[in-house]
């Protein structure tokens, strides 16, 4: 059953919301008891910036069971505008658009679907930014 | 006809997916000629998109323009005929995704292609009554056409979102007047277990689309004392290119007023988002003082016709977020087999 | 602390054992190890297995193994550390002897990956290489994370020689009775194999197989009384951030650095005195990073040195002498125990055609995920 876990993680999955340690700035995507870097116990709620640069990416061609219908899909390592590094699926790109260093932005997409009866799990993905005219 | 002065659009946003299929490509499947297609190409939702994801994208754009704390949004209404869940509101998903949760109200609406405009009417009422401070009205659909049917050329995906609030110095456009005209006219429908809608062919024209749009628009013009000269832009529901141009001729609306809001040829029919995306395209270029008449149409059947007056706020807010043209121009063409893969994904019920 | 010695080993061939349940496979290895050690019972049993709840719908493996090994009554439980579960069981067993509480323990690891479809095994790695609601949620599995590390490595150092690691492993596995893939492959074949997650190719990652391996660990006192060669064991472990990109330098596996340093210190030997290394080459790039982070190869050089033959059986530092994870096989919970058992056979002179010339020490590195934890075992031949 994935419902309670999914619901608990909606703020992060939907809006990149989480907690930053006030002392060392480490980002936690869950509510921390103690900072995983400096062991401080004071945190501020934040939403990570929704854009950044693609540092590296891979294309998965032999996916885990839950993702077979989406193959091939791309996973990227992204450095957001505030320096936080994040892992994300990449979407809405043409093959030749994916290059290290491109600017990418967060969007809201279906990430997994639990068959015909289970819930739809939404979350963030990143796509190449629109060219602003 | 209702005077809705005092309620205004504070933020607006439109989204269409990146993927396009040309009518020619669909025609190639069914041995149809290169000419005489109802539109040139249509927008197709990607494998990870649905009504909720597109609604969120449009809503986020509207929110960027509105510049308000999303927690002040008291109601989120999504009008669609392709809800991701038969039971579970899309509105709460959108509210959570834009940081508006918890909201007071968030039910989904269905009235074929006019569910989005009806959402606007309801929210305008909630604002006027003081029940909510701001409300978010969305029309969004991942419309599917039955393979080989005429509607396959046009059934498309898109979303349009409007944040409404009381009129103030930051408002983008005030809703001056609203009229509606709805009757039991079964021109187009879908039973729950059917994957695709059915339609009654030529019956969808005169007794349906034309009768209701004409009914709503005439009631607005006559009862509210608007002359066509007062109106700078007219946006019609656009299931194809022919119908809106035909109804414009009938109502004696010059084509130059209709063209800016007529995007169907390159987008297709985005159903609940359809006329509203035409409105978004107009707002992307209209100037303060100009008036816009919008007439939606939903099968089953009904039309909402309303008049907006563009305000100064548009100048400062318009460039805060991407215009619809950026989405229209940012495209990737797909072939019919890719189209099937994407369509099969969305039809998993 | 009491000295801990390996008194006997036992393991099965790594293959698709359609006809055996997990516990049968593990019992085989366990009984072989007990007989090899010449003991009829032990004070405790430590079990290593990563995915039995998911693939076999079976938990409570400790009690199950006690029964299947004919040792009902003996305390038993399972340790889990993803793909390093065998090492976790070994670590637990080690502490039991070192503390003086037990005289002899059985450490047995097993995994039956063929009970799942390959895409189910990939789902299993989703559970282990990251967090369920982060990397796991979006399908960034072990292969994806290794591929991203591979990209960063290529950008910094180039990737020459990394795909050569599977070639070395296969060369060593040729003719090895218990290996899953006992045949050579060429570098061309590796480079022509399809991508799993670009740039990682199918022949750069370990396959899916079943296997079980077991060790008997004994105290110094008992080691003296038994007739087996006196091979002392040390083990150390360290953790790191689960996501490699949360670490200061993703290409420095801190967990490996720390556990290797600690175990060398415990054993009182230097890197130069290590006769062989068992790498965690579940992906070629990870094998290379184990060498570099362990301090056996300067950063960025592992691939180039591999191409020069440094890590062959006749090289400066033989690695994966029976084929490593790639060619001998990688049944998750058993792997670390295979590594240690193979080093034991080398030190005991029982390595057959792959026998190194009188090796004195051997080091095995076992990783969970992409280095969230590392366990390093060291075996040292000595007289008691």
Image (cartoon, grey):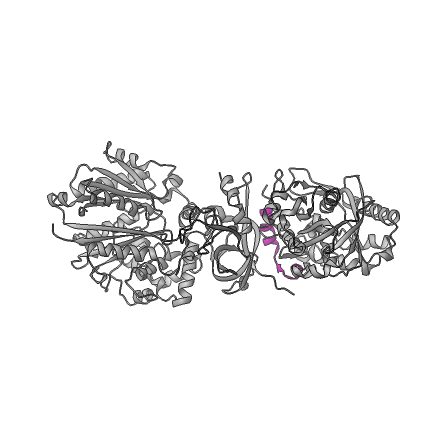
Q: Name the chief secondary structure element in magenta.
A: helix
Task: Answer whether residue C74 is magenta in the image.
Answer: no
Image coords of residue B346 (percent x, y): 60, 46
Apparent side of residue A124 relative to residue C232 in the rendered image (left or right):
right
Q: Quadrant of the C terminus of chain B?
A: top right
Image coords of residue C369 (percent x, y): 38, 51
Which residue is drawn at the image coordinates 28% and 59% (left, top)? Answer: C171
Q: Is residue B17 above or below residue B118?
A: below
Residue at the top extreme? Answer: C73
Q: Nearer the viewer, residue B38 or C198?
A: C198
- Residue B15 seen in the figure: no
Q: Nearer the viewer, residue C179 or B107?
A: B107
Image coords of residue C181 (percent x, y): 31, 53
Q: Quadrant of residue B316?
A: bottom right
Magenta residues, as a range? B327-346
Q: Nearer the viewer, residue C325 or B311?
A: B311
Apparent side of residue C29 relative to residue C201 in the rendered image (left or right):
left
Q: Nearer the viewer, residue C239 or C48?
A: C239
Which residue is drawn at the image coordinates 87% and 57% (left, top)? Answer: B229
Apparent side of residue B92 relative to residue C99 in the rendered image (left or right):
right
Task: Answer whether residue B330 is magenta in the image.
Answer: yes
Total numbered circles:
0
Q: Is residue C340 above or below residue A98?
A: above
Image coords of residue C6 (percent x, y): 19, 47
Q: Quadrant of residue C22?
A: top left
Q: Quadrant of the N terminus of chain B?
A: top right
Q: Is residue A14 above or below residue C291?
A: above
- Residue C214 seen in the figure: yes
């Amino acid at each position: 059953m994935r419902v309670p876990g999914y619901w608990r993680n909606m703020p992060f999955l939907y809006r990149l919301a989480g907690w930053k340690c006030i002392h060392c700035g480490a980002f936690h995507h869950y509510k921390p008891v103690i900072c995983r870097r400096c062991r401080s116990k004071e945190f501020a709620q934040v939403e990570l910036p929704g854009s950044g640069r693609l540092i590296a990416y891979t294309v998965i061609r032999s996916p885990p069971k839950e993702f077979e219908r989406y193959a091939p899909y791309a996973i990227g390592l992204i450095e957001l505008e505030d320096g936080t590094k994040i892992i994300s699926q990449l979407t809405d790109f043409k093959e030749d658009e994916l290059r290290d260093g491109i600017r990418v932005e967060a969007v809201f997409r279906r990430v997994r679907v639990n068959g015909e009866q289970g819930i739809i799990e939404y979350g963030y993905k990143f796509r190449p930014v629109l060219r602003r005219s | 006809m209702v005077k809705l002065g005092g309620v205004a659009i504070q933020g607006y946003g439109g989204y269409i997916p990146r993927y396009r299929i040309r009518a020619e490509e669909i025609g190639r499947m069914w041995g149809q000629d290169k000419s005489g297609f109802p539109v040139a190409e249509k927008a197709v939702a990607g494998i990870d998109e649905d009504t909720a994801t597109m609604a969120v994208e449009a809503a986020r754009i509207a929110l960027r323009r509105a510049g308000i704390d999303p927690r002040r949004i008291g109601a989120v209404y999504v009008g669609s005929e392709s809800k991701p869940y038969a039971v579970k509101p899309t509105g709460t998903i959108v509210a959570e995704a834009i940081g508006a949760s918890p909201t007071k109200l968030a039910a989904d609406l269905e009235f074929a292609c006019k569910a989005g405009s009806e959402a606007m009417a309801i929210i305008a009422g909630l604002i006027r009554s003081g029940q909510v401070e701001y409300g978010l009205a969305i029309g969004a659909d991942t419309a599917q056409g039955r393979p080989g049917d005429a509607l396959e050329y046009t059934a498309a995906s898109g979303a349009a979102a409007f944040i409404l609030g009381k009129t103030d110095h930051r408002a983008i456009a005030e809703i001056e007047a609203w009229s509606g005209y709805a009757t039991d006219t079964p021109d187009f429908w879908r039973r729950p277990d059917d994957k695709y809608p059915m339609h009654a062919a030529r019956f969808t024209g005169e007794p349906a689309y034309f009768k209701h749009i004409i009914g709503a628009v005439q009631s607005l013009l006559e009862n509210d004392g608007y002359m066509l000269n007062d109106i700078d832009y007219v946006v019609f529901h656009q299931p194809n290119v022919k119908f809106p141009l035909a109804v414009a001729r009938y109502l004696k609306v010059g084509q130059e007023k209709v063209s800016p809001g007529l995007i169907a040829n390159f987008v297709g029919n985005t159903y609940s988002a359809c006329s509203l995306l035409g409105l978004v395209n107009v707002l992307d270029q209209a100037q303060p003082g100009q008036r816009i008449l919008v007439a939606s149409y939903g099968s089953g059947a009904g039309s909402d016709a309303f008049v907006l007056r563009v305000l100064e706020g548009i100048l400062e807010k318009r460039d805060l977020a991407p215009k619809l043209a950026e989405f229209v121009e940012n495209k990737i063409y797909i072939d019919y087999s890719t189209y099937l893969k994407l369509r099969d994904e969305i039809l998993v019920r | 602390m009491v000295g801990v010695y390996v008194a006997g080993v036992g393991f099965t061939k790594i293959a698709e054992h359609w006809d055996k349940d997990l516990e049968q496979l593990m019992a085989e290895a366990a009984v072989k190890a007990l007989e090899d050690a010449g003991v009829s019972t032990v004070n405790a049993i430590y079990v290593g297995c990563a995915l039995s709840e998911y693939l076999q719908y079976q938990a409570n493996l400790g009690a199950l193994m006690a029964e299947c090994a004919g040792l009902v009554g003996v305390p038993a439980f399972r340790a889990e550390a993803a793909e390093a579960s065998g090492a976790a069981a070994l670590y637990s067993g080690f502490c039991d002897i070192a503390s003086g509480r037990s005289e002899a323990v059985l450490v047995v690891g097993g995994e039956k990956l063929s009970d799942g479809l390959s895409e189910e095994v990939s789902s299993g790695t989703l559970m282990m290489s990251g967090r369920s609601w982060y990397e796991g949620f979006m399908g960034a599995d072990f292969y994806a994370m290794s591929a991203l590390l591979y990209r960063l490595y290529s950008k910094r150092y180039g990737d020459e020689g990394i795909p050569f690691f599977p070639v070395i492993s296969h060369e060593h596995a040729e003719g090895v009775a218990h290996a899953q893939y006992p045949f050579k492959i060429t570098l061309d074949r590796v480079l022509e194999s399809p991508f799993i997650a670009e740039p990682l190719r199918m022949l750069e990652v370990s396959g899916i197989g079943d296997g079980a391996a077991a060790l008997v660990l004994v105290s110094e006192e008992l080691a003296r009384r038994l007739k087996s060669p006196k091979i002392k064991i040390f083990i150390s472990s360290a953790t790191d951030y689960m996501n490699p990109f949360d670490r200061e330098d993703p290409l420095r596996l801190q967990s490996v650095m720390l556990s290797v340093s600690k175990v060398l210190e415990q054993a009182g030997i230097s890197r130069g005195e290590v006769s062989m290394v068992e790498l965690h080459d579940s992906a070629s790039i990870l094998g290379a990073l184990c060498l570099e982070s362990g301090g056996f190869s300067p950063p960025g050089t592992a691939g180039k040195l591999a191409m020069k033959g440094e890590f062959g059986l006749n090289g400066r530092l033989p690695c994966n002498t029976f084929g490593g994870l790639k060619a001998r096989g990688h049944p998750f919970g058993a792997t670390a125990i295979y590594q240690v058992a193979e080093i034991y056979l080398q030190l005991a002179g029982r390595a057959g055609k792959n026998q190194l010339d009188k090796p004195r020490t051997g080091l095995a590195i076992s990783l969970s995920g992409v280095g969230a934890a590392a366990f390093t075992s060291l075996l040292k031949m000595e007289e008691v």
